[in-house]
Image: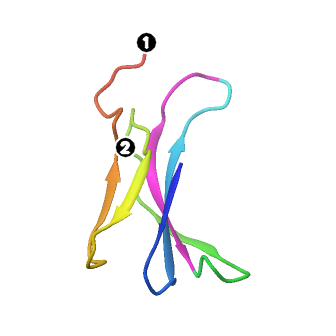
């Protein structure tokens, strides 16, 4: 959905969504943390817990690089 990379290129943050392939449900959106994203062997080192019923659609770092902001526009919407 969306990716942002730290200024030093050491980490990337990836907006993800978890849903069952055979069922139209939202298991929850989360953010994956990738170490060395610009190197030949990037790896997923951590992820936030999924927020049930949401889809993460954007991530951004604050201008000073201290804060990660994630957007969950579907949070609180009921699937019907």
Decide whether the magenta segment is chiefly helix, strand or loop: strand
Give the mark nearest the N terminus, 1 or 2: 2
Asked whether the viewer can see residue 49, the reply is no
Q: Position of residue 4 (x, y in %)?
A: 47, 66
User: Badge 2 is on which residue?
Assistant: 51
Q: Position of residue 16 (x, y in %)?
A: 51, 50
Identify the magenta region.
Answer: 23-35
> In the picture, residue 76 is in which quadrant?
top left
Queried whether the magenta region covers residue 18, the answer comes back as: no
Q: Looking at the image, which residue is at 44% across and 51% down?
A: 30
User: Badge 1 is on which residue?
Assistant: 80
Q: Looking at the image, which residue is at 67% across and 83% down?
A: 39
> In the picture, residue 23 is in which quadrant?
top right
Q: Position of residue 34 (x, y in %)?
A: 54, 72
Q: Tell whether 19 sits left or right of 22.
A: left
Q: Looking at the image, which residue is at 27% across and 74% down?
A: 63
Front residue of this view, candidates 37 and 63: 63
Q: Looking at the image, which residue is at 34% across and 47% down?
A: 71
Q: Tell whether 49 sits left or right of 76.
A: right
Element type at mark 2:
loop
Kindly give the residue lying farthest to the bottom in the view shown.
8
């Amino acid at each position: 959905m969306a990716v942002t990379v730290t200024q030093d290129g050491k980490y990337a943050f990836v907006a993800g969504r978890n849903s069952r392939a055979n069922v139209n449900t939202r298991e929850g959106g989360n953010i994956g943390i990738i170490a060395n994203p610009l190197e030949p062997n990037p790896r997923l080192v951590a992820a936030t817990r999924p927020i049930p019923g949401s889809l993460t659609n954007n991530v951004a770092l604050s201008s000073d690089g201290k804060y990660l902001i994630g957007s969950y526009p579907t949070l609180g919407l009921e699937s019907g």
